[in-house]
Image (cartoon, rainbow, N blue to C red):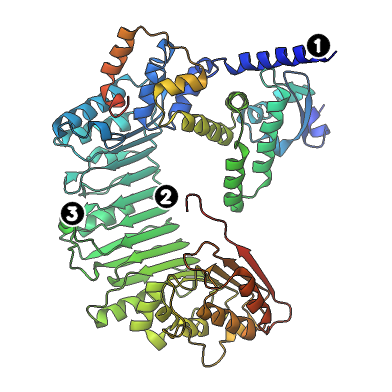
Amino acid sequence: MQSTSRRKRQKLSEEVKLNEAEDRISNLPKNLIGHILSFLPTKYAVRTGILSTKWKWMWTSISNLDFDDQLFLHSSANRNSDYREMSFLKFVYRVLLLLEGSNINKFRITCSQVSDVSYVNSWVTAALLRNVRELDLCLPLGSSVLIPTNLFSCDKLEVLKLGSGFVLNIPSLVDLKSLKTLHLSLVEFMDEESIKRLLSSCPVLEVFALFQCGGKNVSVINISAPALKRLIVEYPAPKCWETSLDEIGITDTQDVCPYEIQLNTPNLLYFAYMGLVAEGFAMNNLSSLVEASIDFELCYDQVEDRYDTAMTELLHGISNVQTLHLSGDCIETLQFYIGPRLQVFRCLTTLELSVKIPAQWELLPNLLECSPNLRTLGFKGLMEEYYEPGKFQGWYPPKRVPTCLLVTLEKIKIGRFRGQETELEVVDYFLTYAKVLKIMDIWFDRYQRRQILSEYEVLRKLLEIPRGSTSCKVRVTCQAKKKGG
Amino acid sequence: MASSIENNNEKLTLKSSDGEEFLVEKHVALQSTLLQNMLDSDCSSADVIPLPKIDARTLALVLGYCKKHADASSSKQGELNSFDSEFLKDMDMGALFNLVLAANFMEIKGLLDIAAQKIADTIKDKPHQEVREIFHVENDYTPEEEAAVREENRWAFEGFP
């Protein structure tokens, strides 16, 4: 009896083994294999040609092309750069030549070296001929390639991402009927009109990200886009090694983004600005704005009135948002330049702050006083670094309790809590004075470098704090350890 | 006479290759372009729609995916993303192939994409010898032919053994 069942089991496991050993992938329909291989960088997709004779031409049915000349090249790093460039260019040509389908979904190419820019025109044309839906191009900084003009009359293109190496020169109105997403990163603008014309040629553009773009002849960047919903503008302080940023009008000594940013975006829902304070902000037509995120980089060297004016303009433009994210540097900058003249945010219901150092607490009472309808207050962390108790005056409790604490503030979220003395003071203040608070959510950072208090001690201290709101819950969650952390 | 779907309170019955029947709400079935086209063209007057290429185990998984996506509102994208990444976790290769074939046949784009991505991730970054082993692909090239494929696509093999 026993031996029969064992024999049965053995037979069963052999069958399973047989099934497991079946080559199922090679027997999938070719279009399905093409779809699977489209999720790989093209280099990997083409490599599958070596698996077996059946696979030799499978890759030709891919619909996404993704070329990066730096991908997995460590072992050939010793070859000379001309060889590497030729080898890469030949590869791109061969793929474009042998591709089966009549349509390309995505075409991405990133290359760190291209000595003959006429290649770029051929790539773009090849992609356009196949009705490309998403195009993503990036060349070496300083290549100064004029964007092929046929790109701007492509009515199938939905996503366009242009990286460094391109010059935007648009002499007349163009036609990008279907373009929904536009990313420009380190692109040089020939003149102010070019960017204006480009945007006015995209009637359905919804997402626009502008990263460190500009030009020598440019002082105003005008973003007028009727359908735009999300806008992200970023001008980080240039690092000293980025010498070729000269072309886009930004030098390494810059302490301010040298452009005036003008918005005319009546349907904008989300606006993010990161980096150096711009020369000026003209914020028109932002009546739909719901959410904003501001992250200035600090530039203490020069105290100038123009920062003050620019920041006031920016804040004025976003004064009707419901959700606002502010970085610690931004809070510090605002404190420094705007201080007590902060405007009121009438509609603001959610405020999220990431505070890095104790000095950045200074503006908080002011911010709370200016947010009379605040319901949710979030801190990404109360402090980035460990500060010895008593060494810094970290927390400046408001001189009088801000209105929102008495009337509207229902939820407080605190991330990366470490149980430091200053942090406990902050928690103490809010638990005591927030009269209608329903929940305080604390994410305890278990894996900090220096454990100040044990979890138990922190919990005990939290429990001791008297609560201004009788219905307030305090929820403490221990953050899970990050992988590899 | 109205079609069985309308009679059946906006539900339809799908039958797997191994004969199991699944009663499905119409809005869930609409996640599949194949079924949507059938409903639109009213080919669905039959009481039961047979899916002869999909077994019950796979069909149950497919319908679980469709239900989650049909019921979630668009504002819950984050929740759907984490559902998607959990959905294929720890799934064995055999089940994954059944699923990708079913999604391809039933034209369920989201499911097709996550399953294809999962298979692609298995191929990525691995030397071809290892890919052959994982998927039991038999190498029927002669050494000369194999060398020729390598030579033709030289850049694709740069950096690989």
Looking at this view, is B159 or A134 the one in front?
B159
Q: How many labels, in total? A: 3
Side of B109 where A392 appears, left or right: left
Q: Does any portion of residue A266 appear in the rendered image?
A: no
Toward the bottom, the furthest residue is: A399
- As helix, strand or loop, the secondary structure at mark 2 comes to loop
Side of A185 where A481 appears, left or right: right
What residue lies at 46% left-to-right and 19% top-to-bottom? B132
Mark pair 3, 1: CA separation: 83 Å
Q: Which residue is mark 3?
A: A190
Q: Quadrant of residue A13?
A: top right
Question: In this rendering, do the residues under marks 3 and 1 share a single chain?
Answer: yes
Answer yes or no: do the residues labelled 3 and 1 have beta carbons within 8 Å? no
Q: Which residue is mark 1?
A: A4
- As helix, strand or loop, the secondary structure at mark 1 comes to helix
Residue neighbourhood size for the residue with mark 3, other residues' Cα within 10 Å, grouped as few (<14), some (14–19), many (≥20): many
Q: Which residue is mark 2?
A: A204
Disc 1 marks a residue whose amino acid type is Thr
Quarter of the rendering occupied by the N terminus of chain B: top right
Answer yes or no: do the residues labelled 3 and 2 have beta carbons within 8 Å? no
The mark lying in front, picked from 3 and 1, is 1
Q: Is residue A340 above or below residue B129?
A: below
